[in-house]
Structures are given as structure tokens and as C-alpha cells.
Image: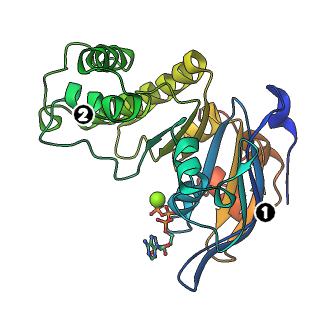
Amino acid sequence: MISSQDSRRDSGKEEIRVEGLTMAYGEKIIQKDLNFSIYKGDIFIIMGGSGCGKSTLLKHLIGLIRPYRGRIIFKGIDFWNVSQEKRLEMLRGCGVLYQSGALWSSMTLLENITLPITQLSGLSQKEAKEIASFKLSLVGLGGYEDYYPAQISGGMRKRAALARAIALDPDVLFFDEPSAGLDPVSAKHLDDLILEIRKSLGATIVIVSHELASILSIGNNSVFLDSETKTMLATGHPKRLLMESEDPKIIEFLTRGTGKRELRLV
Ligand SMILES: Nc1ncnc2c1ncn2[C@@H]1O[C@H](COP(=O)(O)OP(=O)(O)OP(=O)(O)O)[C@@H](O)[C@H]1O
Ligand SMILES: [Mg+2]
């Protein structure tokens, strides 16, 4: 298995460590024996075929599902070795964009983003609205405050959901398939936005993605999950996996089945 050290280049600080993780729903094992680290400032990609357990892993990383076996160490603390109260406090520093991450359809974009701010920060409605408006402008939706989700395009909805995920200036962000369903140009814009957010917030970003262009252009660390063997086949820089992996499944995934190891497509 390829396991690279190159992602430590930023500061070397470990943000999340996954140790001997087995994930299951009831007795149904989804993935077993996962071991990898996510470092501060990483854009960490969770990849693998449909149904292999990527969204499930994301939910484990944010302490929403208890491991069947093994541990998730988040900023040095084991999620499941602390009180529920402490776990919620740990989650407060995280922003999440779920795969089905719909906005509330009965609320305007501004209201959608104001709500979590007032709920979680204790700021006044007025202050929260100002922040929400600023976040919308950050994702290029200034002027759309009073629109309802149904009145904007799919790409704009993704950006609004992104604004909601960054509402409270999280230092760790989790995105599940942020560019699914977007055309290549919108997907590229979203990638650029993710890079900007990482820079402006100094955040660590964990992304579930199928988009090869995104994986190879913005990811600097990753884990590859396999549904057949129900375990990870590699962790490390996606470009390095593309150029050096000997595993046929990884080569197939990262070359879109062509087997040609080239970085030109990004
Ligand atoms: N709440 C649940 N209860 C029981 N089984 C579940 C639950 N959620 C997911 N599963 C099962 O776990 C497996 C992994 O699902 P998961 O959604 O994590 O995969 P994924 O890699 O994110 O898939 P996709 O690429 O389609 O988003 C699937 O077999 C799925 O049916
Ligand atoms: Mg999923």
C-alpha cells in the first residue's frame, strides 16, 4: 500500500487521525482496518466507487457515527472518549456540506445562513444577518439574499450551501460531493472557491469526490476506499498515487479506465 509522507509539508500538525477504524451499520461491515491521518491545511480527498462507504466515513470523521472498532482522534481528542457535550463543542469548529445538503426551501438564502449563526453563536439577529450577507458575497451570491433556493440554479444552490457551511468560520470543513451535478465550468469555479476558502480561513478541508479534475488539481492528500475488499487501498497525494500506484483499481479510478498515467487532463 502506498502511504505518503508528503502531506505533512504544511505544518506537520495532525488534525484528524483514524486508527484501526471499522465502520458498520448494525452487523453489516462497510469498511475495515482504516488507518490514515489528515494534516492541518490539507485538502484531503475521500475517493472510491459508489457505495463503498465514503459518506459513512465522513460521518465518522465528524463524530456522528460511533466506530464499530477503532478510534477517530480529532485534534488530539478521541470523539468517543468524551461526553456528548464535549463532542458537540468539538463539532462547533466544523463546517459540513452533506451530500443531500439541501437548503431549507421555505427560507431565503439570507435566512438559510443566518439561522445556524444565531443558533450556534449567540450573536444578535442583526449581527448574524451581516455575517450571512458577507458569506453570501464570499461565494459570489451578493445581491441574492432574498431569493429562495428554488429561484436559483443548481450551481448557485451549491455555493449557498457552501456559504452556510462556512457561516461560523470553521477551521475544519467537510464536503460530500460538492460538485456533483455541476457542469465542468461550474465545478472548476467551485474548486477555485474551495481553494480561496482554505486560504482565507486557513482551514483543513475534507472532500468526498468523484471528480477526477478536482481530485488531481486541489487534493494534496487522500484515502482510496475499495468496496470489494472493504478496506482502504492507499493513502497519500492523489498525483503520487496516480503516478506510482501499482494497484489496478487505483490506476483505473485515477485514469478513468484508460490506464494512461498523465496529469494533463487537469
Ligand atoms: N443509515 C444507513 N443504514 C444502513 N446502511 C446504510 C446507511 N447508510 C448507508 N448505508 C449503506 O452503507 C454503504 C455505504 O454507503 P455510503 O453512503 O457511505 O456510500 P458512498 O461511498 O458515499 O456512496 P455514493 O458514492 O453513492 O455516495 C452502502 O451499502 C449503503 O447502502
Ligand atoms: Mg456518498
The residue under the point 30% across, 15% down is: 127
**Quadrant of residue 145 in the image?**
top left
- Mark nearer the N terminus (2 vs 1): 2
Residue 247's disc number = 1
Is residue 36 left or right of 93 when viewed as pictured? right
| Left or right relative to 124: residue 18 | right
Badge 2 amino acid: Asn
Q: Amino acid at mark 1?
A: Asp
Identify residue for label 2.
112
Which of the 4 image quarters holds residue 158?
top left
Confirm or reject: label 2 Cβ below 8 Å from ligand 2: no
Expressed as whole percent of the image width and height from the top left, the position of residue 134 reads 34, 13
Tell me the crowding category of disc 1: few under 14, some 14 to 19, or many 20 or more residues within 10 angstroms, Cα based.
some
User: Under tag 2, what secondary structure?
Assistant: helix
Of residue 136 and residue 219, the one placed in the foreground of this image is: 136
Rounded to the nearest angstrom, the CA distance separating label 2 from label 1 is: 44 Å
Q: What is the x, y in percent for residue 5?
A: 88, 41
Q: Where does residue 156 sit, x and y in percent of width and height?
A: 27, 30
